[in-house]
Amino acid sequence: MKRILYNLFMQILFWLVAFTIGRAVFMIYNANLIAAENPGLWHSLGAFWHALHLDLATTCYLMFFPFLVLVVQTFYSPGWLNWFHKGYAFLILLLYSLIIAAENGVYFEWRTKLTYKALQILTHPSEIYNTAETDKFFILLAIFLFQLIFSYWLYVRFFFKPLSGIRRNVVFSILFFILMPPLLIIGARGGIQEIPIMQSQAYYSSHQVLNLAATNSFFNLSASVRENYRYKGKNIFIQYPPEEAEKTVEELYQTEKDTTVGILTTQRPNVVLLILESWSADLIEALGGDPGITPAFDSLQKEGVLFTRIYSSGTRSEQGMACLFGGFPAHPISSIAVQPDKYNYLPSLTRKMIENGYSTSFYFGGQLIYGNIKSYIYYNGFQRIKEIYDFDPSFPRAKLGIHDEFTLAEQIRDLSVEKTPFFSSLFTVSTHSPFDMPLAVKKDWGYGSIINDYLNSAYYTDQCLGDYFRKARQQSWYDSTLFILIADHSHFSQKNWYYHSPEYHRIPLLFYGEVIKREYRGTTDDRIGSQVDLSSTLLSQLHIDDSAFVWSKDLFNPYAPEFAYVSFEEGIGWIVPEGHFFWVNNLNVFYSNELKSNIDLINRQGKSFLQVVYQRYLDY
């Protein structure tokens, strides 16, 4: 029976080696591009180390078929069964070698690994041959043959151990059949943690080429296919001729005057962006929430600028990140932030800040692989990124990560020695289900247990914010810092709003700090907007060009159009001063339609917006 286990181990080891060879081929082929970014030798070699977790997960997926053959061989082991192993290995290597060759071919043009979109192009080999340079074509062909032939030779020569004449052992066969599948499943999902492994696990560098090198090609392609195959690149939200829809959306953004109300005393303040996980506007007393849930926020609001009609464009954190840092609206079915080949087309608020002399950092007490956020954060170019693994291991942890009080305190410690001006973002975690928090006494807010847990988690995070600002006021950088507090998305609340209502999706947005002119402190702004508008709003205050953020509006421009777009699965919510509607495409029905005037025009605007946004996502 040791021969069975040894055979299993050697096959697992082989796939790790095969993936390493493919990674080495990619890095050698693209050595000039890597060298141009000058990451350094040891940092570049780190791609092999950071790839291991994702490689092992992919290997566990691939081992399910060999495992089943090995189960048969525990009680019936004729020599011909070994050909199943060899044939399967050759088939997978054939596919993997094709992927490696194709990736090297597309990377120079697209700066991405092989994706579903690229796969569609590869279904026309004659077109590829006709458009490719001759020498490049034969180099890629050589890469394909080398990867296939050399890897298969290694497999047969050193790793595969043929099995025959295995003595039956019923107890071993049963235990092997029962115990191995759970281990393979755990390995395939990357461990027993709550969030399954995603491409982000391999990301470690500010150099995107190294992150892509570390990302397993099989895993990346399968994830891209899953995200895109459902509708095969078809825009199911088409309601109008494309030119007409584009024109309608273009007219939506027409602004009478390109101006803004300057609320800051300086053009280059430090900027701290605090992203509040799952915060509904109903947590804030000034926004109609119950008193006492977020007293620290309420105190800040009295000295800041509070927006009262801001809505979350999406319902998931990864969508919120694309809204905040890329200025791209959320959309149904998938999220652009989980697909590296697509979010490469987005502008980056972080990179814009770096271009204008800002040092940058990002903090999160949980695992950034959640929603594939990690890869998107690295793409944005943050110069320092801290997630759960980068904090002191002695910090108390909840199910999803480090409690907010410790993450917030870590940011303050780091900013005390940060080069100014800085742009530092922090994403809280404690208000995410299961609402773990270290409160000694939890309040009974008079609602059911789930709502009470949510409110208590917000009460805890608010206490952390209160302590955070008490400490921040003692720092030398405090007086020259603009703080922005905004949610990544909303959440069900004690108000029990209908999901397809504006109130359900309303979130807080607060500008706060000593850099705000005194005449604007303690004011509210009732203009309608969403997180997508943060990029243009902030950059306009800093007098930095925001033209790349075409979906974003300046909330401080009194002439900017007022609307908010809410995305949900297969539908849209559209909120304007005249009212709102929530519409479902596949049923062609309105869940709600409370427009008071211009009904036909506003319906066309909202449906056109969804059509154009989703088409833009598909085109990327």
Image (cartoon, rainbow, N blue to C red):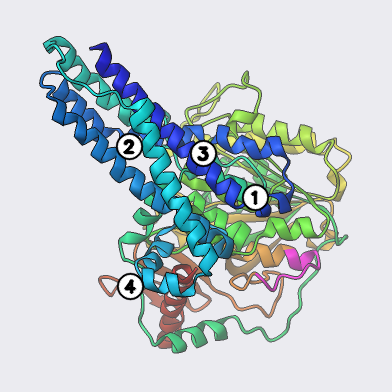
Q: Residue 201: which disc?
A: 3
Q: Kindly identify the amino acid type of the residue bearing the numbered disc 1.
A: Ala
Magenta region includes residue 165: no
Q: Is 467 in front, or is 177?
A: 177
- Say what amino acid the circle numbered 4 marks: Ile
**523 lies left or right of 247:** right
The residue to which callout 2 is attached is: 61
- How busy is the neighbourhood of tag 2: few (under 14 within 10 Å), some, or many (20 plus)? some
Q: Spatial distance from mark 1 to mark 3, Cα to Cα?
A: 23 Å
Q: Position of residue 177 (x, y in %)?
A: 19, 22
Q: Which residues are magenta?
A: 539-548
Label 1: which residue? 31
Quadrant including the N terminus: top left
Q: Secondary structure at mark 4?
A: loop
The residue under label 2 is which amino acid type?
Tyr
Do the residues bearing badges 3 and 2 touch, measured as CB atoms within 8 Å? no
What amino acid does circle 3 point to?
Gln
Distance from Cα at disc 4 to Cα at disc 2: 32 Å
Identify whether 57 is placed above or below 79: below
Q: Secondary structure at mark 3?
A: helix
The image shows residue 245, relative to residue 521, as above or below, that is below
Q: Quote the CA–CA distance across marks 2 and 1.
A: 30 Å
Label 4 or label 2, whichever lies nearer to me, is 2
